[in-house]
Amino acid sequence: MIHMTNISKSYNKGEIKAVDNLSLHIRPGEIFGFLGPNGAGKTTTIKMIVGLLNPDKGSIVINGHDIENETIEAKQSIGYVPDNPNIYDRLNGIEYLNFLADVYRVSEDVRRERIEYLLNMFGLTDAAYDPINTYSHGMKQKIVLTGALIHEPAVWILDEPMVGLDPKSSHFLKEYMREHCNRGNTVFFSTHVLEVAERLCDRIGIINKGKLIAIGTMNELRGGEHAESLESIFLELTEI
Amino acid sequence: MRPITSLIKINLKVNFGISVLRHKLKHQKDKRIEFIASAIAILVAICSLIFMYTFILMGLYRQSMAINQPGLIIAYGFVVTQLMTFIFGIIYIMSAFYFSNDLSILVPLPLTAGDVMLAKFITILANEYLVVLPMLLPPIIIYGINEIASPIFGIKAVILIIFAPIIPLAIATIIIMILMRFINLSRHKDALTIIGGVLSIFIVIALNVVSQNMTGTEEDMLFKAQLDLLEIVGKKFPPSLWASRGLVYGGTEGLLNFLVFIVVSLLLFVGLIALANRVFYKGLLAGQEASKKKVHRPIKDKSIKRHHPVFSLFMKEWKLFLRTPIYAVNGLIGIILMPILILLPIITEDSELQELQSLIHAPGAEMVITLIGIALIIFTATMTLIASTAISREGSTFWISKIIPISPREQIFAKLLHAMAIALIGIFITGSAYALILNVSPARLLVMLLIGSLASMAINILSLIIDVIKPKLDWDNPQEAVKKNINGLYGMLISFLIIGLLGFVVFLLFDRGEMAIYSAISVLLIILNFLALKLLFKKADKTYRKLEL
Ligand SMILES: Nc1ncnc2c1ncn2[C@@H]1O[C@H](COP(=O)(O)OP(=O)(O)O)[C@@H](O)[C@H]1O
Ligand SMILES: [Mg+2]
């Protein structure tokens, strides 16, 4: 569902190589956890997938659409939540969601059902008509999540989605990710909370200094040795 | 380095965008030309203002020589400067102390309120010198040249210029600080911005009424008004007089005035810092508590109605524009103000109006009146800055525009619709007011509205192109997106260019009759619109792809 082939990205005219010749293939039905220490290149990779950054080289195909040539179709397939979202905070919650439903061309019946369901699960129904600039950080995060999922995109791309969520919402999100993938869709999320990755992900990729240094299921990463936790694998691999 | 010195340094750097500028000049060669171009544009604008001011001062100087009071010009300079510093100070301080985002970072740092106040105060002071220098230097130079000044005059002048903004700025700060302690201004932030906007409309109208009443015996009246100003401000606010006496008078009287001015400035400054330590943070914190009552409202059908994406984008623009006071005030002030100014003679029952109206029916006059009307309409409709800041205003929310599955041209088209909607309202109101007061026939009004709309469309498209090519997305206060955005200035320049272009066409075809002029202008504008729109779409596709964030 997500095909990244040899993508690279550097900042400041090549001074900082944030992502270095990365290739990744995420399959349908898969929850993929993207791990790495701070500054490893997770956010940079994600921004290239959703089209906020242009890769210096390499290609990215989402749900069969190349993001260079079939931009609109690729975008329609993505639901993206940035790590630190700034949204139109002069709109109220409902206006923001309805705006997104319009631009993603969601029918009235479907948008009603999803908005009501998601707001209810996130405990945001009471605040739906409040201006977004009165929201707390977590509430903002939740309204962005709701907006990103309103068109049931095939591919979810979430940058550190659990940060700032209360336990109930983060539990709900994990369940919802699982359901989504069971329908044959894909979730790609970055995190540095290892327990979440360990419990939730079908496969895990570890990135360090812009390079993918390990990829596989938990079992494969352990290399057969049962006792080893993801934490020790992570520490071992990123230490070098 | 002491923390306070580095805090001041950082504030100054951020204020003048030095780090960003240096980075840009160093790393992006193509930005250099653009920087130089902007610098020249700003310089030209400022120079013409200073020129006008100096011209007024020369008149004043001649008059005050006649009554043997050459020092009046200095007093006038100080009064005007300190008045301006005070007014600007109130605005700067409100936004720097209470509405800015960096305070949430500064407050938890191990600095005293006095330190933070000091850093902010010095930064604002640096801004104020940009006002003080062009206001004070001309009178001092005029006086200095004509009265053959001594070196001591020069030294005193430099010191006084340095101290000039301190007293008014300190007073402004103290007023705001105390006000904040008792009234929660930041909760009424939006209301305040609107009140400020409305107030400035009234000031413009008042100035207009005053200047209209002054026609006839102009220079004398102006002089009298200046003397009145001197007397009023001098009485209520003696520091201006101390400063000017300190500079103009020699001997002990001069020295005494000079010293009083300096000492009072220093005392106020120290007092301010002391006061800051007591009340500054308390006032700030009072501003942070939001009051909210919870009501459960089920989701209404109306609020999840489906629209075409372009319409939805248009509605979003419209809502954000109206709900962000600084945008609304800036965008609407022109279209509210202009009709009022046009209708003012009726309201004040100006006797010249009837003369004017009788002139209109002279042969040939109707065409000229129509053409002037068109120019006026174009001017009003494009003062709004809506198009020339359309992308800049998105700021840190621009990522949404980049990820939604809507083509850049459709997004830009929604922005054009928004700019045109406001422009059309302005065109209609201004055109009608103009037609009403000058008895313009309905047919000519129609021509005015049509050509006005075509021209403002061209201007809006060209302004959008400018903002698309180089949007200013990096801001944290919406004010910066409109007020500190060079694209707004370019947008204004474009309107002048278009008005100039149309004027040239009129000049070429003046003898060919009205029909020829109107049709030539219309055809020209239609072609221009067509070409500009194509260019806009092309640029939009490119920029939306290229911009990274
Ligand atoms: N806009 C930028 N300009 C320059 N360097 C950047 C920029 N954004 C990220 N970087 C650098 O790129 C590297 C990767 O950053 P990022 O992708 O944000 O890491 P992560 O999300 O894994 O913490 C870091 O070294 C960071 O400093
Ligand atoms: Mg990151």
Image: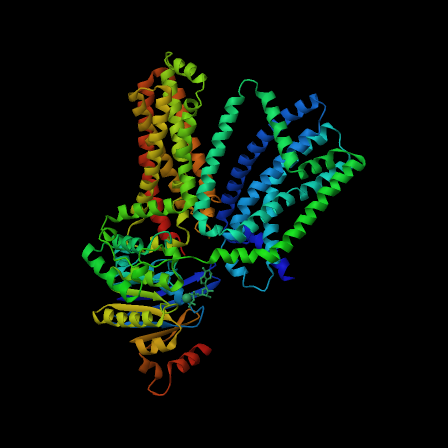
Q: Is residue B21 visible?
A: no
Given residues B168 and B320, the one toward you in this image is B168
Q: Considering only vertical position in the picture, is B268 above or below B65? A: below
Q: In this view, does B368 lie to the left or right of B133?
A: left
Q: How is the image coloured?
A: rainbow
In the rendered image, the vertical position of residue A54 relative to residue A162, given as above or below: above
Residue that sits furthest to the front in the current view? B182
**A166 relative to A53, above or below:** below
Q: In this view, does B40 lie above or below B97?
A: above
In the image shown, does B328 or B369 lie closer to the viewer? B328
Residue shown at 75%/36% (left/top)?
Answer: B153
Q: Where is residue B203 in the image (x, y as percent from the top left)?
A: 50, 33
Position of residue B187 measured from the top left corner of the image (x, y, whole percent): 45, 52
Report the residue at 55% width, 58% height from top.
Answer: B281
Is any atom of residue A72 visible in this view?
yes
Residue B127, percent from left and from top? 58, 45
Outermost residue on the left side: it is A109
Task: Classify residue B131 as left or right of residue B306.
Answer: right
Nearest the eye: B352 or A173 = B352
In the rendered image, the residue lying farthest to the right is: B251
* Quadrant into which the C terminus of chain B falls: bottom left
Q: Quadrant of residue A85?
A: bottom left
Quadrant of ligand 1: it is bottom left
Quadrant of the image for the N terminus of chain B?
bottom right
| Residue B538 point in image, percent of width and height | 33, 44
